[in-house]
Amino acid sequence: MDITTTPAWSAALDSAAAISQTTLKDLFDGDSSRTETLSVEVLVGKDALLVDFSKQNIDKNSLQKLIAVAEQAGVERKRNDMFAGVIINGTENQPALHTALRAPLETSINVDGVDVMKEVHRVRTLVNDFAESVRSGSVTGATGKKFQSVINVGIGGSDLGPTLVHEALSSSTTPAVRAHFVSNIDPTDVRAVLQNCDPETTFVVLCSKSFSTAETLSNGRIIAQWISDAVGSKNASKHFAVVSVFPEKAASAGLSADYAFPMWSWVGGRYSISSAVNLVNVIAFGSNAFDNMLVGMRAMDEHFMTEPLHRNAPVLMGLLNIWNRSLLGRETRAMIAYSTALKSFASYVQQLEMESNGKRVTVDGQPVSLPTSPIVWGGVGTNAQHAYMQLLHQGTSVVPADFIGVAATPTRDTEAHDVLVANLFAQTQALAFGNSAEPHRTLPGNRPSTTLMLSSLTPHTLGALIALYEHSVFVQGCVFGINSFDQWGVELGKKLAAEVSAQISAPSQTGGTDASTANLVQWYNKHRSNT
Ligand code: F6P
């Protein structure tokens, strides 16, 4: 169904036109209960996540219209299908079951007639037990020395999630084993990491859902050689674990690993942080931290499953993104975390959202008739204020923004932390209400934002925050009518990269290539380093 042909969509469009005649100031002045109605708190044990949508250009009426759009798009039915393991990723003939990874053992979820929950919990125990053995030193390297460093080798979903979790948890917990992350095929990336590690005490997690990703294979081989050179090729495999749907592919790629942790084709790479993909952090921070992160994710899953649409944080967040992108035409959305520990959150959500919803055809292969994913970008506050916030305040484009903050700091510097958070709140205030002054100094205001506050940055709140965005992306995909779980757009570039690599090795083979690329290959060959 094309949502844009429905009366619900027409009503939402009318509502968007009406809201464009109002300002946030009018909306706050006209409704004293606005903040309450438009804020949702999700609790995880003693921790809390508050989402305040009140500084979005929305009122009760337009919210109702958006909820009608969600109903029309079948968001609740599709959500239930996703959790139940129905095949919703049609082009890959797969369910999308990342939520099974944090569901209790007694849940029953069938894929191809097999209940997957036993296997999910078996692998979780395997990961936790193995990580504890590395931490305690009962699993060692080839020369019997305790591992001091762990390198996660992966890219995209096999890197961005582990990196985010690592940075976030490092702010309050010192990792027991130093973690490093290698993703890019740029050899300077891997060499820079190796410079800071000792091969005898380094453990390597080769993390790749498909185990066919060129970057990961290349980096894995460089590291395997580096370890073999130091400990001998016979026992180098003691330093390697593989996390993959196809662990057996490692050996055929020339990468021997003593340890293997499965994942499943029904977990998308960008949705895989609740799987063995997080092994590097279970080694660094321990199994409790992983379990607690999954508790946080599960709390958000339950909230998403049970709360009515108008009090459901992922639903509201998804619908407000539809509102800004598809109904009001805002092309980008900024993500600004007022927490250095969350400095990679924008990159994480960028992949999650743009790879999931950057699509131009519907599930039936028909062209979409509405703008899909916004361009998601961002960084860290307050740095952003001294770099690009100028445009958000006074530029000619309206850029909706998500501001993320943390109430408690793990340091003793509460005064500095108060100023950090004050800046976050002040930015949202300036964007919403602006000022009046002479033209150069005028901020027009009426610029929308959502504020997300974590009581403190713990595995609980981090898990809940990640799951919130996962589900918000899902809600948007339902309304767009697209498949949020495939990523065919990245394939052509991979194929062409292999072809161009062959042309670089044999420059006379550039026949049939476009003139620009042939010229670039020629120029590159003239200047490349020859070893
Ligand atoms: O090329 C895109 C992509 O497939 C992402 O979807 C994925 O997260 C990343 O590459 C890495 O893939 P893999 O985990 O299979 O190495």
Image (tube, rainbow, N blue to C red):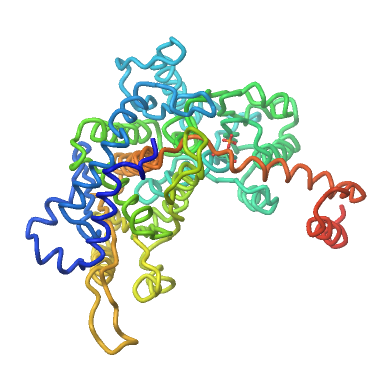
Question: Looking at the image, which residue is at 26% across and 72% down?
Answer: 445
- Residue 401, position as x, y percentages in the image: 34, 60
**Residue 178 visible in the current orientation:** no
Question: Looking at the image, which residue is at 45% across and 40% down?
Answer: 176
Report ligand 1 position as a quadrant.
Answer: top right
Asked whether 271 or 105 is in front, the reply is: 271
- Residue 283, position as x, y percentages in the image: 47, 34
Total marks shown come to: 0
Asked whether 339 or 391 is in front, the reply is: 391
**Residue 398 visible in the current orientation:** yes
- Residue 487, position as x, y percentages in the image: 55, 39
Asked whether 317 or 57 is in front, the reply is: 57
Asked whether 161 or 433 is in front, the reply is: 433
Q: Is residue 179 above or below residue 84?
A: below
Which of the 4 quarters of the picture holds residue 109? top left
Q: Is residue 513 left or right of residue 418?
A: right
